[in-house]
Amino acid sequence: MPAWTDRLRFAFQPVVNVVTGSVAALELLARPEEGDLLCSARRSPELDVEIAALAVRSAARQEALLPLHVNLFAATLAELPEPTPLLAAVREVGRRPWEITVDVGPPFSGLWRDPLVEAVRSLRERGYRICVDGVGDGDVPVRLLAELAPDIVKLDASLTAGLPGDERRRAVVGALRHFCESVGGRLAVEGVETERQFAAVRELGVHLAQGNLFAPAARRPTADVYRPPVPPPAAAVPASAPAGPPVAAFLRPAALLPLSVSAERVREVLTASEETSGVVLVDDDGVPVRTIDRDRFLLSLSGRYGHALHADRPALRLADHPRTIPLAATAWQVLDVVAADARRRTGDDVAVVDPAGRCVGVVRLADIVRSLAESRVEEAVGLNPLTRLPGSDVVNRELERRIAQGVGVAVSWLDVDAFKQVNDGAGFAAGDELIRAVGHHLALCARQFAGALVGHIGGDDFLVLCAPEELAAIAGAVLDRPWSAGGLPVTLSLATLLCPPGRICDHHQAAGQLATLKKEAKALDGTSWVRAQAGHAGHQILRGDSRPYPVRRAAAN
């Protein structure tokens, strides 16, 4: 070994799951005792790979069983697409590739893009996870980020620092979260130092976090981290989105052991940490074959003659068939898996697998039930007390999500014509009954379509989000119906903005254009409907009669 290894030590920093507060992995940070070894590694790919290999061996000596994050410069992979010493170290210590995430760090400028993309592809085919590090203060091109499609995008601490009060930074984080979710990845942030920063990253849907708030980097690995009080969500989960949050938000590291492992070795793993609720027995490809529940296993060994009967024999004898779910699944689908299994296994972990069937972690029923319960409570708080429909915050959040995903959407604003006169003529009770009836009918119509969401934003005003192809059926169902309050006939006005992908940037822009369209609808006699397309001049009158004074018309788009 070269002499410089005697002056190199490694620190371990926990990577924390923001939702569950558990440690998802450990990042290995090189800490030279003297000299500028890391600057030398930036210029020498061979040295950089050797340091990464030493990091893996150092973790093995510390008996760190959690998944690991190992750092490599982007230039290293571009010049050495086959980091042989690192791959050899992983095999040597008995780690599996899918337990290792390679953090590819800046600088990215001046590199040959194709060799780097090819090197990442090769590592991923072997089972390694890929993280693009230093985003936000580094120089990673957006196009390269898209081509790499990393499993994790890690934001630099300089971006995290200003998140609590900077809407522009929050917008950047939100956009990157949508990118990660669209490619099946997760968003991580570094430098979480305060509880306000933690509240901000959790509110923005960040999946993983690091920082001194949880635990500083230390010479010995630890799973004992500070778990900040969980703030309530900023907005409710829309009632029209029963899929629930993604499984990735609840992912915990799995204790992976080979099928041949003895019961005594499993006992050692389970008793070493109270956080380990079970073990997943995998084949040589990392595919779950059996699972072991902590409580039932330890109970079997603690009974009379239990240790003597089982300790030196294969743990497979005390294992169950695995319950698995894809990484792309949702929390509600996990509940379906649990409900379909035997009652005695209700509390068992569910193994999460990637597209190749390899175990990437586990989820716990308690985490999911707690999160879904919180979201339902917050949703109930946000409902309009008159109609029990969600308010503008929920609708705006869903609109922002569809805009970020590049999904075409129709946004409609419906209200009752001359509602003050309705109240004055028929009474407040009749007015409230009318609003309840309109809201109920809109909600019934929307339930027929997977992409429809109805919100009651106050008074007699409703917002409807739906796919453009669902618009005609929903509009017809509510506008064709005769409405009355206290025996007096009532008409409605509907303004619709069609938003093809890329035509609007946020809900503020949509609201501004809808306000203009609503005035056009109100200028028509009878039940009216006007429609326009974002980015196009004019509007189309689909229902309603012109009044004596001029009303602007334009050809249909």
Image: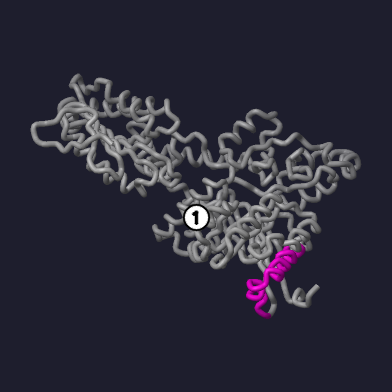
Magenta stretch: residue 49 in it? yes
Q: Is residue 231 visible?
A: yes
Residue 20's spot in the image, x, y percent? 59, 49
Horizontally, is 465 left or right of 368 in the view?
A: left
Q: How is the image coloured?
A: one colour
**In the image, residue 289 lies at what x, y percent?**
76, 38
The question of residue 347 being in magenta is answered with: no
Residue projecting furthest to the left:
548
Q: Is residue 115 left or right of residue 544?
A: right
Judge the density around disc 1: few (<14), some (14-19), many (≥20) Cα neighbours within 10 Å.
many
| Left or right of residue 411, residue 45 in this image | right
Q: What amino acid is labelled 1 in the image? A: Val
The residue drawn where x is 27% and y is 25% is 479
Query: Considering the numbered disc 1 on the image, is that residue within a helix, a strand or a loop?
Result: helix
Please tell me whether the stretch drawn in magenta is mainly helix, strand or loop. helix
Q: Residue at x 50, y 50 (%)?
A: 179
- Image location of residue 271, percent across then percent down: 77, 50
Residue reaching furthest to the bottom = 35
| Image quadrant assignment for residue 493 | top left
Q: Nearer the viewer, residue 377 or 326?
A: 326
**In the rendering, at what x and y percent does residue 440 appear?**
35, 26
Residue at image coords 52%, 38%:
244
Taking the image as shown, residue 35 lies to the left or right of residue 144, namely right
- State the residue in front, 515 or 311: 515
Residue 118 position by quadrant: bottom right
Q: Is residue 281 above or below residue 104?
A: above
Magenta span: 35-58
* Picture mark count: 1
Q: Which residue is mark 1?
A: 201
